[in-house]
Amino acid sequence: MNELDVVGVRVEMPSNQPIVLLREVGGDRYLPIWIGPGEATAIAFAQQGMAPPRPLTHDLFKDVLEALGQELTEVRITDLREGVFYAELVFAGGVEVSARPSDAIALALRTGTPIYGSDGVLDDAGIAIPDEQEDEVEKFREFLDQISPEDFGTNSQ
């Protein structure tokens, strides 16, 4: 397993499909995962430290974990089959629960939980971006600084 950082969320054109981009810590691979608009909003809210007036599903899940005294210890992006990514939530007692990567990432950002990607997933879907292309990634980061969750056109009630 390789630790991953969340670079951010953006909308891929022309399909208008949100994407979350993860970066391998200590490596040069990036992992793009296409996600839904609701999850894009949830991830963007968490990255920007925004608290909605009413808790989103991921905020609620975090609150329930805290109320029950459960700790999410890691999120793992474990597999890629037929274009679909799979993830697991790993809890302090060793319990593992299957999850969509977008939900797992949104929860990890809210709880400060590390995110890991399997070697197989990074080998199959990771995109190596050498240092000389890092300026393109910087442009992506600048783009992320200019967007807000409202840009995804979802209603977060």
Image (spheres, rainbow, N blue to C red):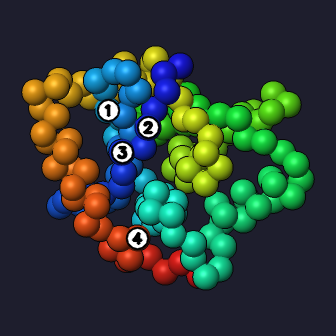
Q: Earlier in the sequence, mark 1 or mark 2?
A: 2
Q: Which residue is mark 2?
A: 5
User: Which mark lies nearer to you, 3 or 1?
Assistant: 3
Left or right: where 56 falls relative to 73: left
Q: Would you say the residues marked 3 and 1 are in contact, meaning their CB atoms lie under 8 Å apart?
A: yes
Q: Would you say the residues marked 2 and 3 are in contact, meaning their CB atoms lie under 8 Å apart?
A: yes
Label placed on residue 30 = 1
Tell which residue pokes out farthest to the right in this image: 68
Residue 61's x, y, as percent?
A: 73, 59
Q: Which residue is mark 3?
A: 7
Q: Earlier in the sequence, mark 4 or mark 1?
A: 1
How many C-alpha atoms fall within 10 Å of the one at disc 2: few (<14), some, or many (≥20)? some
The quarter of the picture where residue 154 lies is bottom left
Tell me the distance, in whole angstroms, between the alpha carbons under discs 3 and 1.
9 Å
Please name the amino acid that badge 2 sits on. Asp
Please name the amino acid that badge 4 sits on. Pro
Q: Earlier in the sequence, mark 4 or mark 2?
A: 2
The quarter of the picture where residue 71 lies is top right
In the rendered image, the vertical position of residue 46 relative to residue 141, given as above or below: below
Would residue 97 be visible to someone looking at this image?
no
In the rendered image, the vertical position of residue 52 relative to residue 65, given as above or below: below
Image point (56%, 50%), residue name: 109
Tell me the distance, in whole angstroms, between the alpha carbons under discs 4 and 2.
19 Å
Image point (29%, 68%), residue name: 147
Secondary structure category for the residue under label 2: strand
Residue 136's x, y, as percent?
A: 14, 42
- Between 84 and 30, the residue placed more toward the observer is 30
Tell me the distance, in whole angstroms, between the alpha carbons under discs 3 and 4.
15 Å
The quarter of the picture where residue 29 lies is top left
Q: Which residue is mark 4?
A: 149
User: Which mark lies nearer to you, 1 or 2?
Assistant: 2
